[in-house]
Amino acid sequence: MRVLIVGAGIGGLSAAIALQRRGMETVLFERTTELKEIGAGIALAANAMKALDSLGLADAVQYIGAEPQFYEVRSWRGEVLSRVPVAEHREKMGAASVATHRADLQMALLKGLAETRGEVHLGTECVRVDQTEEYVQASFAGGREERGDLLIGADGLNSTVRERLLGDGPPRYAGYTAWRAVVTPERELVPQWGVESWGRGTRFLFAPIGRRRVYWAAAENAPQGAVHGPAGGAKDALLGAFRGWHEPIEKLIRATDERAILHTAIYDRDPLGERWGEGRISLLGDAAHPMTPDLGQGACQAIEDAAVLAKCLSEESDPALALRHYEAHRTRRVATIVLRSRRLGRVAQLENPLLCRLRDVLLKRTPDRMLLRQAEEIVACEV
């Protein structure tokens, strides 16, 4: 079986490795001319690590990252509102939760792809997909055409494959924008676990990702398309927005090179129904189910998609039917996570002072064990 995969991000690379390991031929097509991961840190919860284990990559990824023992939510002043012992997922799930750099994860995936002898073609922008009962065809800018037995659209938030397949318009703006960076600060600023602090329409997150590096992210409510920051740039804007917040937030921002700060608006989509594709074509990762980063599950669910896709294709001889089985396994789970992530983002980004105070009080009164059970539902991997 020859599978065409459009998009060589985390989801596309994971899918190629998973399929190659099960004896299928994959060909990856990436529109950029260089595989350079855009992003900073990434959280790989136990479900993603379990899926990576099925790809033979869990040990390599765990080696390059850090394994936080706890995840805290605090007020902007530093008051602890909740503390979830994420390390307990290791015993219950049989896998650790790991935080690492996106570039390191990408390198591990590329190494895994090379070991399985998968192909990747850069600078090939997919502009059209067609199919018959016998094959699927992808057309690329410049006139190149490729045929395969199946095609998987793993080309991200603004997926060309999705647009050609579904034509359901642009993604939904979540109402806030985010900045991300990785910094190697003074040793005393490196935290031992992940911390997310909530203010009024603003948040700040930081976590260790291994080798003395710290990943941080900031979020702020903003109209869609708003231009952020004074003439001094993002760093000055962030120092102003988070002045007076608990330590080490300002110190982490000050220790960051302005050029290392990435800015992105946050989008998601309403979940699709029970199908993501048609015939010999389907979707994977952000092309199928983009979600806000509030649960840290975007990449995790893409990796899960890859493992489940490979399992379904290896168990069903009819390619189109195998894709429908894959979608049936995944649609309900990811729909739940997309909506939970959206709801959490709305709560965390509240601006009204009274509602923010009520939110913080209710969260502090919620038993940590209850929050742990909710987290366990999210990381209950299907693989």
Image (cartoon, rainbow, N blue to C red):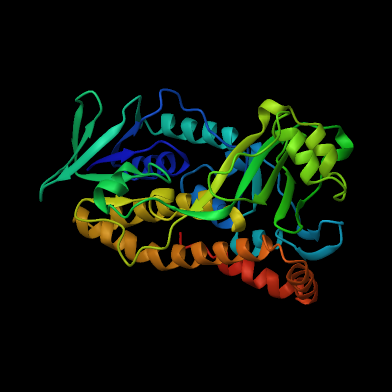
Vertical relation: 338 (above or below) 296: below
Image point 32% across, 45% down: which residue?
153
- Residue 67 screen position, x and y as percent: 71, 48
| Residue 47 or residue 125, whichever sits in front | 125
- Determine which quarter of the picture holds residue 325: bottom left
Q: Residue at x 39, y 49 (%)?
A: 287
Q: Is residue 361 left or right of residue 66?
A: right
| Percent x, y of residue 304 | 46, 54
The answer to which quarter of the image holds residue 356 is bottom right
Residue 168 is situated, as x and y percent measured from the top left of the image, at 31, 55
* Total count of labels: 0
Q: Is residue 196 above or below residue 363?
A: above
Which residue is drawn at the image coordinates 19% and 25% (left, top)?
143
In this rendering, position of residue 162 left or right of residue 68: left
Q: Quadrant of the N terminus?
A: top left
Front residue of this view, candidates 44 and 348: 348
Residue 228 lies, with reference to residue 92, above or below; the image says above
Q: Is residue 70 visible?
A: no
Q: Is residue 1 left or right of residue 70?
A: left
Q: Is residue 31 visible?
A: yes
Q: Nearer the viewer, residue 333 or 340?
A: 340
Residue nearest the observer in this picture, 12 or 383? 12
Residue 248 pos. (x, y %): 85, 44
